[in-house]
Amino acid sequence: MKRFAEAAEAIAQTSSKLAKIAILAEYLRSLPSDADLAAAARFFTGNPFPQRSESTLAVGGRTLVAAAQNVWGVTDAELARGYRASGDLGAALAQYLREPADLGLFRAPLTPSAFMAILEEIAQSRGAAANKRRQILVERALGACESALEAKYVVKIVTGELRIGLREGLIVDGIAEAFSAPVADVRRAAMAAGDIGAVAVAAKAGTLASVEIAYGAPIAFMLASPLQFGSEYKDLAAQSWLVEDKYDGVRIQAHKDGTEVRLFSRRLNETSAAWPEIVEALRAQIDADVILDGEIVAVDGEKILPFRILQTRLQRKEVSEDLLRDVPVAYVVFDCLARDGAFLLDEPLEARREALAELRLDSERLRSAPWNALEAGSTQEDVHDRFEAARVRGNEGLVFKRTDAPYAPGKRGKWWLKLKRELDTVDAVVVAVEWGHGKRANVLSDYTFAVRGEGGELLVIGKAYSGLTDAEIATMTEWFLAHRLPEPEASRVYEELELARSEIPVEPAIVVEIAFDVVHRSTLHKSGYALRFPRIVRLRDDKSPAEIDTVGKLAHLLP
Ligand code: AMP
């Protein structure tokens, strides 16, 4: 590790990318064994384990300090002083390096592979004595260090804080230069294997092309940048885009390898057990080995339901039969990242979409996301029409994707753009209620609400019938029944507020917060305004009817 430390320090000290790559390449080329090469390449990423492995070190600062004290006899005071001066535990500990008190019969230098073996043992330490065991293992690594610089980097790797200004891209470049391999080949292999160590070894052996896709190891998700709603959408004019609905569910990456199916969440945790019907559908309905990207949404037949319906399934690791029946879901797939032996990440979206189409996903549980091309010369109005159509389908908005773009794992770039509307809310008072339909036929679930006009009078702006829980609706039903307006006031209100006969006027006392997509001018109500997609967010028990919003606020919110 002495030479690793020297190379790392030299890399940290230059700001030139080319110099960093050259130092890295020379060091990697000089390593005698494959095991050393694999370990060292990973150490440069700051994580000694393959990117996609679940191993972690879990060595706390206290364990490290205790180990250093045992090996070098550092005192607490010395350590505190050193840490304050450098802010870097590695540097702080390393300056106290001395000959170990207990010199074994012989001391072998710490090679990258020997250090890796120690780190693997640390990661595998479990149970009651795990901390003690980890400490002993750290002591073994520190005790083998011959220089302060070496100890500094050993500590940095244990703490996972290498910080030498070496991004993964530069490590790929370094490996390519070290073994005269094309950078694109190294990058492809790195994505396929998810282990830069294995890639370095393959580059050295000239076998990059045969690095296979590691099915079952999650790939970081590609993300979208926001588009400002109502802007001119200039970005959309210049390129060729595909448009999809923006689904409001949970993002899921599915890996199918033979009969083995695994699902991963956006944070790359495995969540297969939460979606058994999707796992089963993938197993039964797809012939190939694949990695897919998409969104799980709650559904009612063909129809997509709001996120809050799906939410009831999210907190559970395992789902009951009841829940499976009550909240059916579908996996809407919008990307295909690998199929059989071929990685498709570097293929343009168009080609990935073709691969997806060939899978013919169109069952109840497994669907491929419908998409359209955005015509050249589309206006703001065209974009908004599409947006409204997506909303009517129950989705959150739109996602625009460049047809020529690769799948860029972990990136939030300009290749994917998302369009959604920020929610606005108004506080309004309930002026009338109505019996619901279907399951809600016995409760007063539909509310007509009003804001205040210039003269303080109440003006109806709309009606909504969703958003509250069943318990809230039941309690409110009782309240409304007890607070119906008596005659002749009721008749006066029917007239003044232009209520329909099915609406029951009530005391204007209950304040509700209403969310909506957009305010527009309308002759439907006397207020002159109406809301699109109004929904009740919550009851505002904390507000009195005197504090509700005015038509002035609605005028202000007009698009
Ligand atoms: P946001 O959560 O608003 O940052 O939006 C980004 C998220 O939208 C992504 O992480 C996906 O989970 C989700 N999403 C929904 N529909 C799509 C789609 N068609 N393509 C890509 N991402 C989508």
Image (tube, grey):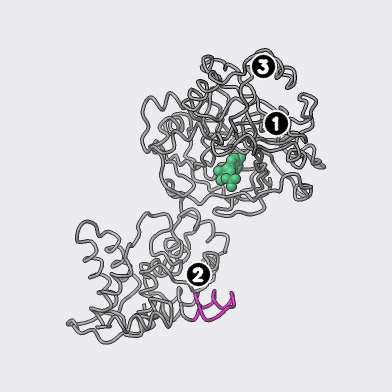
Pointer 2 or 1: first along the chain: 2
Name which of mark 1 and mark 3 comes first in the sequence: 3
Picture quadrant where residue 335 is located: top right
> Could you tell whether 60 is left or right of 266 in the image?
left
Q: Which mark is residue 532?
A: 1
| Gap between marks 1 and 3 measured at Cα | 28 Å
Q: Is residue 19 magenta?
A: yes
- Residue pushed farthest front? 488
The mark lying in front, picked from 2 and 3, is 3
Q: Residues within 10 Å of mark 3 (few under 14, many from 20)?
A: some
Is 70 on the left or on the right of 25, as rendered? left
Which amino acid, mark 1?
Answer: Arg
Residue count near mark 2 (Cα–Cα under 10 Å), binned few <14, some 14–19, many ≥20 = some
User: Of residues 501 and 172, which is closer to you in this image?
Assistant: 501
Q: Which mark is residue 193?
A: none
Residue picked out by circle 3: 490
Say which of 175 and 487 sits in front.
487
Q: Label for residue 179?
A: 2
Q: Amino acid at mark 3?
A: Ala
Separation (CA) of disc 2 from disc 3: 87 Å
Q: Quadrant of ligand 1?
A: top right
Quarter occupied by the C terminus: top right
Instruction: Answer above or below: position of 74 versus 161.
Output: below
Nearer the viewer's eye, disc 1 or disc 3?
3
Q: Which residues are magenta?
A: 10-25
Q: Position of residue 254 (x, y in %)?
A: 47, 40
Element on which disc 3 rests: helix
- The correct choice, above or below, for 138 with respect to 441 in the image is below
At 66% from the left edge and 43% from the top edge, which residue is drawn? 422
Amino acid at pointer 2:
Phe
Q: Main secondary structure of the magenta part?
A: helix
